[in-house]
Amino acid sequence: MEYFEDYEVEPSEVDKIIDEAKNKIVKLVEENAKTELDDEFKRSEILSKRLAEKETLIVQKDFEIDTLNKKIKELTETIQKKKTEMPLTNFNIGDSVYLIETDGKKHSIQCPRCNGTGHVTFMVGDEEIEGKCPICKGHSHYDYNLSKSEVEFYQYKPSSSYEIIGIQLDLKDSKISVTYFVGSFRCPFVESEIYKSYGEAKIACEEANKKSLEKAQRELEGKETKEDRS
Ligand SMILES: [Zn+2]
């Protein structure tokens, strides 16, 4: 073999050199691969750690979303409750309503017994005696336009229809009061003073008329003074 002859190296020496070189290369490759693997491992470890962090964050965010959803639910329920607690007004803006008003006529009652004079005559035996009327007790109302024992009173009728143009809610002593602005009237009305229909207003008028007459009769009989009238 010419190769060995040229370099005059023993074949066993050559094998040794080759083996050594081989070993060095293998070691180098191994070390390189190990370093690369180590780096790869470190990178994957970092990535795993980041992933774990992200997962923790997701769990946290999920919890936060849950908490917020619960809060939204609570608030929605509170709003719903407040809405039902709010007084529902019986009337709305734009509704046509009726009021009751005085009929513009003069109404008065006289004592039926003494015809408003306050005096009656009794027959005692053959004698005629004048005395105070037992019904009105001769009650005088000191009103120049009225005769003695005569009482004026009001009578009511339904108004024409008006439109509700405003509703006012006032908070007073933790209670909400509702007042309405009707037609061109400048004064506000409470709910009990306005009526949905002519029929309802008419029934209310009949009731008010009855009360007014009864009050006048009590006044006539001296059971109530004019000042007691509201
Ligand atoms: Zn009388």
Image (cartoon, rainbow, N blue to C red):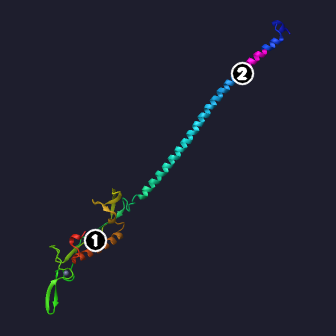
Q: Is residue 196 above or below residue 166?
A: below
Q: Which of marks 2 and 1 is in front?
A: 2
Q: Main secondary structure of the magenta part?
A: helix
- Return the x and y of residue 191 as percentages of the image width and height: 34, 63
Q: Mark 2 points at which residue?
A: 29
Residue 69: x and y, percent? 51, 48
Q: In which quarter of the image is residue 14?
A: top right
Query: Where's the N terminus, which quadrant?
Result: top right
Element carrying mark 2: helix
Say left or right for 204 vs 123.
right
Q: Can residue 108 be seen in this view?
A: no
Q: Which residue is drawn at 81% across and 11% down?
A: 13
Looking at the image, tell me whether mark 2 or mark 1 is earlier in sequence order.
2
Q: Between 11 and 135, which is closer to the camera in this rendering?
A: 11
| Amino acid on which disc 2 is placed | Val
The residue that label 1 is drawn on is: 156
The reply to whether dot 2 and dot 1 touch (C-beta < 8 Å) is: no
Q: Is residue 122 left or right of residue 44?
A: left
Q: Quadrant of residue 160?
A: bottom left
- Viewer-nearest residue: 106 or 129: 129
State the extent of the magenta-drawn residues as a range: 18-28
Q: Could you say which is closer to the camera, residue 92 or residue 144?
A: 144
- Amino acid type at mark 1: Tyr
31 up-or-down from 54: above or below: above
Q: Distance between the residues labelled 2 and 1?
A: 116 Å
Q: Quadrant holding ligand 1?
A: bottom left
**Is residue 87 one of those drawn in magenta?**
no
Q: Who's the residue at 65% across and 29% down the image?
A: 41
